[in-house]
Image: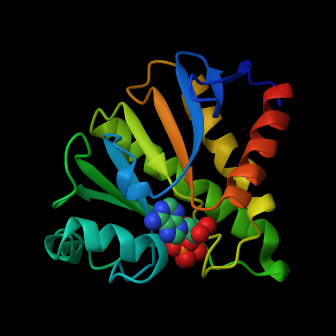
């Protein structure tokens, strides 16, 4: 892998990896409660709202979140846009609306590249806003059908590559996994990247 990092456990026992001056950690729960400067939404290309994470974030942020996304007129798959956080309380100030791909086995490599770029663009947008902490859900692994064991190393590697570049405002990347099974998959992926 070639990325120097240390696999650790945070005080609460959750897996964590130190990359350069930053950290990647995993938690189980609801991303709306992440209490990071920015939270990432698994949006769709129309930015018109939906179920899953999108529904939870829009419910918590209130109808003004639609007003904030509407001017963009949508977002390409593999990209992202950033808005304010509506009614989600501080410290969360931004929502990144990232559009992951709908998975298809026949287009696996293309889907992997799009998932990676959705993470990369999200992190770049966080830098532009001087965000220090950002929470990601497991983008594309719900309705969009991306196998989570395939998605986890792609998402984690994008975060590691971002942090290792140094001189970053982002210092903490948290992956918020919805179920214990999803947390387990990400933990195993993080441990094997940590050995790389
Ligand atoms: P996509 O359309 O990108 O697949 P989904 O919202 O359907 O997006 O699912 C993405 C992932 O987010 C799934 O693993 C799902 O279990 C998880 N998820 C759903 N609700 C939440 C939530 N409130 N917080 C964190 N993760 C969630």
Q: Please provide percent x and percent y for residue 181.
A: 73, 60
What residue appears at the point 62 percent right and 79 percent down from the top-left corner?
A: 144
In the displayed structure, 70 sits above or below 122; it is below
User: Is residue 78 visible in this depiction of the protein?
Assistant: no
Q: Which image quadrant shows ligand 1? A: bottom right
Q: Please provide percent x and percent y for residue 21.
A: 52, 16
Residue 71 located left or right of residue 95: left
Q: Please provide percent x and percent y for residue 94.
A: 26, 50
What residue appears at the point 63 percent right and 55 percent down from the top-left corner?
A: 116
User: Is residue 15 visible in this depiction of the protein?
Assistant: yes
The structure's colour scheme is rainbow
In the displayed structure, 174 sits above or below 149; it is above
Quadrant assignment, res 30:
bottom left
Quadrant assignment, res 164:
top right
Q: Please provide percent x and percent y for residue 22.
A: 53, 22
Quadrant (top left, top right, bottom left, bottom right) of the N terminus: top right
What residue appears at the point 38 percent right and 77 percent down from the top-left corner?
A: 55
In the displayed structure, 105 sits above or below 126; it is below
């Amino acid at each position: 892998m070639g990325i120097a990092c240390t696999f650790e456990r945070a005080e609460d026992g959750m897996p964590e990896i130190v990359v350069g001056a930053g950290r990647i950690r995993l938690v189980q729960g609801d991303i709306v409660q992440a209490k990071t400067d920015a939270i990432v939404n698994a949006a769709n290309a129309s930015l018109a709202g939906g179920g899953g994470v999108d529904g939870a974030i829009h419910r918590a942020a209130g109808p003004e979140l639609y007003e904030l996304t509407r001017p963009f007129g949508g977002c390409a798959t593999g990209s992202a846009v950033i808005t304010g956080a509506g009614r989600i309380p501080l410290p969360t100030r931004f929502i990144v609306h990232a559009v992951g791909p709908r998975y298809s086995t026949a287009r696996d490599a293309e889907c992997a590249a799009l998932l990676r770029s959705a993470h990369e663009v999200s992190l770049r947008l966080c830098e532009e806003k001087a965000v220090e902490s950002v929470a990601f859900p497991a983008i594309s692994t719900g309705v969009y059908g991306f196998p989570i064991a395939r998605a986890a190393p792609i998402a984690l590697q994008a975060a590691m590559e971002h942090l290792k570049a140094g001189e970053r405002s982002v210092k903490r990347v948290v992956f918020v996994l919805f179920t214990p099974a999803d947390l387990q998959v990400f933990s195993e992926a993080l441990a094997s990247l940590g050995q790389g």
